[in-house]
Amino acid sequence: MHAVSINDFYWRYPNFTGIKGDYALKAISLEINEGEFFGITGPSGSGKSTLCYAIAGLIPHQIKLPLNLDDGIKGEIRVLGEAVTAIKNENGKPAITGVGSMSPEVGLVMQDPESQFLSMSVMNEMSLGLQMMGLEKSEMEERIKAAMEMVGLGELYQGASRIHPSELSGGQKQRLVIASFLAMRPKILILDEPTSDLDPKGKLEVIETIAKLKSESKMTIILVEHNPELMLKFADRMAVLYEGSLIAVDKPSKIYSNNELTKKYNVYTPEISELSEYFSIDESPKVTIEKSGFSIERAIQKHSESIISMKGIGFSYDDGTKALENIDISIEKGSLVALVGQNGSGKSTLSKIISGILAPSSGTMEIAGIKPTNKKTRSKLPMHVSYVFQNPDHQIFTRSVTDEIKYSLNNAGITGTHASEMVSGILEKVGLSDKANEDPVFLGRGQKRRLAVASSIVLKPEILIVDEPTTGQDYHMSTEIMELIKKLNDEGVTIILITHDMRLVAEYCRRVLVMSRGSLVFDGTPESLFMNDSILKLSSLSEPQSVRLSKEMINIGVLKEPLISAKEWLEFFDFMKSKTSIAFRSFGDIEKAKLKILSKIQSFGKPSGIISIERGGMILGSMLAESLNCESYSISASHYNEIGALTKDVNVNGIESLDLKPKGQYIVVDELVDTGKTLDTIMHTLKQRFPDSNFSTCTMMAKPHSIIKPDIIAEEVENTTWVVFDYEKNESIREFKASNPKMLKELNEHFSTQLDNRYAKEISLMENAFKSSGKNPEVIIYENPTTAIYARLASDILGIKKLIGVRNANYIKGYGAYLCAAIISSNNETAEELKSLINSKDKIVINIGIMKIGE
Amino acid sequence: MGESTSSISDRFSQYTLRWHGSKLTTTQYALFAIQMAVIILLSWLGAIATPVVGPGIGFLFWAYPFFVVFTLWWGFWGIFGAWLGSFVGSGLLTGLPVIPAMAFSIGDLVPALLIFLLYRGYLRKHGVDPLGRDILKSKKSAAWFAIWVMGITNIIGGLWGVWVLVLLGFVPASAYALGAGLWILGDAIVLLIAPFLSKYVTPVVERFGLINTGWVS
Amino acid sequence: MESKNQRAEKRMVKTILFSARSSSFYVNMNPIAKFALLIMLSVGVVISMLHAVPDLQYNLLVLVLAVGFLIESGTIKYLVKSYLSLLLVALMVMMVWWIIFNQVGSNPILSVSFLGATLHITYLSLYVGIGKVSGYASMALMTLLTIMSTRDADIISALNKLKLPFKLVFFASLIARSLNIMADDLNSIKQAQFARGAGSNSDNIFKRVSAFMMLSIPLTTSIIKRSVDMGFALESRGFSKTKKFSNFIDEKRMRYSDFTIIAFGIFMLLLPFMAQ
């Protein structure tokens, strides 16, 4: 006997007025075996929940139907051999028969745990179903205890009659609902997206419960879920629904490896299946991954003035519960920041404070130039900050999709044809053009969410806070929404993305704020978050599949740093395929390039200054500055923070030491422009920071695939060429030793025979000096431009990637906290001055002129 | 009855004063409990969040227009909700002592009952929408709304409520007229929402098939 | 382990309004005794207030009792935070009304002329005002105390004891449960609307009315969605087919202390008569 047997079933929700809707379920024929763990997946609005309700006998028996039954329902559903729903002819008219709800044999756990609670104590919730079964008290107690223990809530049993459901966490709530059905000892348990409204911790709790059910009970389990990893882990078979039709029923591994099917029907696939060319879900990898020196170039957080600045912000509820404590945040204009953490960690409270909904209990803040100190100033914030809530139902209040968007526009004084054009434009973008005249109440959950997003972004607010914009969306729509948000960000809108989806964080955000119990516990890049196990554990977050794979690769020495998304993995594979040759460049080559560049610079006229990008542009930049006899500056753009650690924010550093003249002409210099992302970010930052100055770009070498074409290029190299400079000898050998033994040979040969040794004396002096000092500096501070070349050489000798070029001692004041710094200067006076400013006992001072070791 | 009114009256004919309309589903059972909770909440909000006229009386009694439409939709349940909202929401939960709260809540029960009787009985037969969707469209409906809902039933409620307070010694007898006047005026202002609620929200509930065709279902 | 300990030492218990101390005498009193005391004290105060000159001592006695129990039950802090200002406004309005509209007594302390009419404030009118206000305050605090110290489960248990049909009792419990959910929804809707610049904090009454109107669509959607969810949750536990609903929670028995409280209530009810 099958647990469930559905035969050619059709269902359409009745519309008592207006036009008939489409079928929510079409020609469904399906058999689920007893004891099977059966998964159901499909995009939003595909009929997954409806199918669950139909199996549970709630549809059509608990739906109010028009008196005259039309063709809205056809077919038959049998559960455990009994007809739950069937259509019979009575006096020539169709009539619904069947037993309806099969309780207690069939249990149903729905999405939102909150509205499934029917009583006011945990104990009552557990007993309710059993009371309806008419059981004796002793049996109820025994069943309740057993069921609560099974879902891991055994510890709540003692005080269960005094605990109100609202006092439980999201995960506990949903586990309690599951337990309340388990106590009824059902033969079939249907779980309709039981984790969709939960935070990562809640999800994990529920998943563990489901895993336990699978291993310990012989129950038939039907699980509706978007998450492919869960499906792969638990389901014996799964079905894909699309627009009410059953598209496929098969093993999860077969379904997820069927690229054509998953793409066509927008099925969420495991991240790794995006790399199906290289990996396979159920077989061994299709490629051999060699060690490589690959290093990903990520977009860099743009530096600009802060639009949100909060100091010491705290918030307490009326009953004294502290929701936020001492929050210090500064968010820069135009950034896209992820805000993550468990439910109740304070994310929403913080967002509500930013958007003016709540007033902080303590602290000061400035949002978009407004200091909201009272109700009146706070009420101005919605004009600058748009907050798209998680539940779209709460934010929609007109009777047509068009009116909903128009409402926002009219509020901002935009009316007439212009408004209409904007409405149709945005509806097109979010795929709701065909629903323009529909009543939003009757849209699907995913569609409502898109409408809520659309009505907020249509006005291009200065700050946009979006809470879980992709929940309940299929893959295609999720991408569309995120691209829309990304585009808005590119246009300068500051975005705060609240999400539990670490894939989104990895792919779209360059800064993550992690909240836990009302405090900010992490502020940094996604990659540093994903590598920080203690924070992940504290905030119950889990890294994306890509990162897990990276960690394994790092362990075996294939990668140096994690690749955090499928996109980065693809870049890695491209890199592996593409780098085929090494090009060596010496100091002599740089000098030749300098001459070439100088001749081209003439067409620009003499620049006011040269801005070298540390470390690549240092040597060429200082040479150019000396030849042109103009001011020399240096800035750096790296994934390393100001103390040189990879674990912190990605930044453009040193911009504060630029005292550029308005209307001045500056040339930004780098040695090699590869993908061009770094240079692009730097240029963007500079132009934003110094709108009145003019900037040109110049490089010794550039590759055709660069996203930015420098104004002056001395030489072009192939995309597939790996360029190694003489002054990178030690670094290159170190790197290639670990990653690419094949190329290491070539590298060694080059350095043993053809090295340009013009600085050999200084190099050996510095090597000896460092060795005899016995110190291990973390940063090199040098006098720019005079000692730039030596600093770059010292960086190679010491393996220090963090350099700070200063034009005079004043600029060093902010860097007083280094434990150990190598200070390189050209004369005693500057060396002493720098030394006195560095607040550390452990300094090495090297004066290039006389090469002496200090302290 | 003429041609046109007969066709309108056909559309309205399902909403009557018969006891049971159709089978009561479990969803409806839950719906009625929830709508009562909403009325209790709105009554509470109205009583505590707006300027106080006298003890326990909020000037803008937000629940009023809502229980008017809930009554038109859900008959008995709406009327019961109006009473419960008044007794618990604007009564007990705001600190209005239990005895006056009980007596005072009749002042909402009776208007709700009278409104339902008139709309589902007399007015339905005379071409006025029994769900009040046409108040903003038809002069006749607007007049009936103004006279019966904003006027007579509201006045009955106000006179009763303040009279109870006077009787219990909470409000001085000489302040009766002013107290009742303010009550009636405040309610009349918030009742202006009711026609809009009827017009915009009734179709949503109707499309779900959730409007009672009789008193109970 | 941490959560286990927290549960074992659970000090506050959620009540209809806010929370109360779980070990409190008043909180653990049988709800029937609690309601009986509330009714009797209220009737006592109403009797006192029906007189032209209310019994100030009696009203103050009830007031002190109410405050004592508020402290004992641990609910006083919620009262202070949420209701005190509200109550004070109501009491002030009441006082003003009694002074203006109750022109009694012969020795004016103060006379004010306004638009041709003269208003006298006498010792007697002040005394009456204070008597009325204290009576009202004592009843209001007693009512709030009862609401803030009673759990919704207690009410259901009391209704069960009255042997009412299961579906009726459960309906009452569902209303209580929905209060919690809808309060959250309503709050969230208001905040969501504020975020779209729709809510109004304006002092203009008509603006506030029209802002409130905007709540109707999301509120209705929320009511319908919640009712479908709850209906389905109920039905998947076999609600409509239930023939026998067995009892699970032990009904609170009346203890000696409960009878003592009722006896005290009767004494307090008779006190005004005895005093006469």
Image (tube, coloured by chain):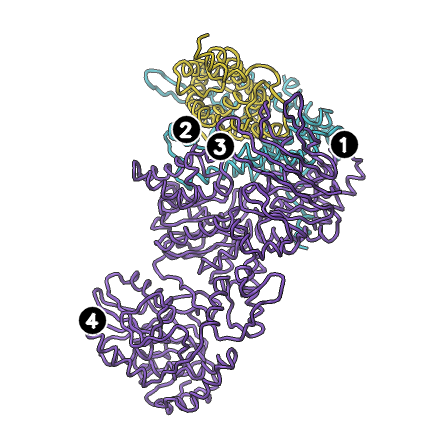
Chain colours: A purple, B yellow, C cyan
Can the viewer see residue A259?
yes
Instruction: Please tell me which residue lies in front, C136 or B81.
Output: B81
Can the viewer see residue A652?
no
What is the chain letter for disc 2? C
What is the chain letter for disc 1? C
The quadrant in which the N terminus of chain A is found is: top right
Query: Mark 1: which amino acid?
Result: Ser
Q: Residues within 10 Å of mark 2 (few under 14, many from 20)?
A: some
CA–CA distance in space, label 3 to label 4: 74 Å
Label 2 close to label 1 by CB (< 8 Å): no
Q: Quick check: A50 left or right of A610? A: right
Query: Mark 4: which amino acid?
Result: Phe
Camera-near label (3 vs 1) is 1
From the image, tell me which residue sits under label 3: C86
Camera-near label (3 vs 2) is 2
From the image, tell me which residue sits under label 4: A604
Q: Residues within 10 Å of mark 1 (few under 14, many from 20)?
A: some
Where's residue A753, x and y in %? 41, 91
Which mark sits nearer the N-terminus, 3 or 2?
Answer: 3
Which mark sits nearer the N-terminus, 3 or 1?
Answer: 3
From the image, tell me which residue sits under label 2: C209
Quadrant of the image occupied by residue A841: bottom left
Where's residue B123, x and y in %? 48, 12
CA–CA distance in space, label 1 to label 4: 92 Å
Query: Mark 2: which amino acid?
Result: Val
